Amino acid sequence: MIVTRSISVRIALIVIAAVILQTSFFSFLSIFGVTPYLVPAVIVSIGFLGGAVVGDNKGIAAGFLLDSMLLTSGDKCVRTPSYYAFELAKPHRGKTSLKTEPAQGDPLGLSVSASAEGNSLVLTLVNPKHEEGVKLQCSVAGKTLASATARSLHSADFNACNTFESPDAIVPKTVQAAARGSEITIELPPLSVTTVQATLG
């Protein structure tokens, strides 16, 4: 298929429409407990029709639209929840990744990432479930913990977003994390990203 300027404009409008429908309608729809994801289906269809390069380009564009970290308008700039999710992952940089072993084998359950350098330990915990929080005990094999602090990104309002009028509607907040012996105890809010920074004794 030859992609002319008019076809490119049409494809761009289709991608934008798919993103708007995904964020405003499909993300709140549940069919047998599963949320339909329209955007990948649209991108794959575009790839079949226009070829791999067109599909790749539109897929990247859709990703930026869905996960943009900053919103700008004139001299105004707002940090989105995606920005803060990346910020919570920053303490892992420069550290060595550690193997984690979740107690439960639910593939849709808790996600855990861990890294360490010297006496510094970082855990990032993602609770993808919107219906319940998770009270968690993390055990660090062969180590003693001196202290732990945590910040969590979440909102009780699942429709909340950062806007120019309310730029801080969703920002990381300090949550309590207790370090005792070789264990960290923390309660994760529903639908949250939490980073724990601990000091080894």
Image (cartoon, rainbow, N blue to C red):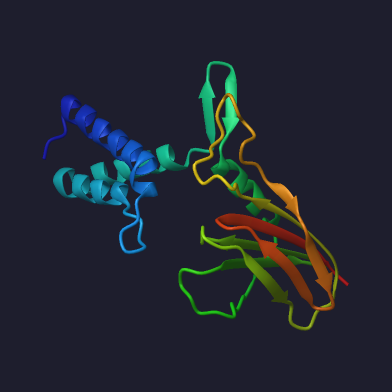
| Quadrant of the rendered image containing residue 14 | top left
Residue 21 in the image, given as x and y percentages of width and height: 32, 39
Q: Residue furthest top?
A: 74
Furthest toward the bottom, the residue is 142
The answer to whether residue 92 is visible is no
Asked whether the viewer can see residue 44, the reply is yes
Residue 123 x, y percent position in the rendering: 68, 64
Q: Which quadrant of the view contains residue 134?
A: bottom right
Query: Of 58 and 137, which appears nearest the observer?
Result: 137
> Front-most of 148 and 141?
148
Left or right of 175, for residue 98: left
Viewport quadrant of the N terminus: top left
| Quadrant the C terminus occupies | bottom right
Q: Residue at x 16, y 34 (%)?
A: 3
Residue 105 sits above or below residue 126 on the image: below
Between 116 and 39, which is closer to the camera in this rendering? 39
Lateral position of residue 127 relative to residue 142, left or right: left
Across the whole image, how many numbered discs are drawn on residues?
0
171 to the left or right of 178 = left
Q: Is residue 103 left or right of residue 68?
A: right
| Residue 41 rendering spot, x and y as whole percentages | 25, 51
Task: Please name the residue shown 55% across and 79% down the image.
Answer: 104
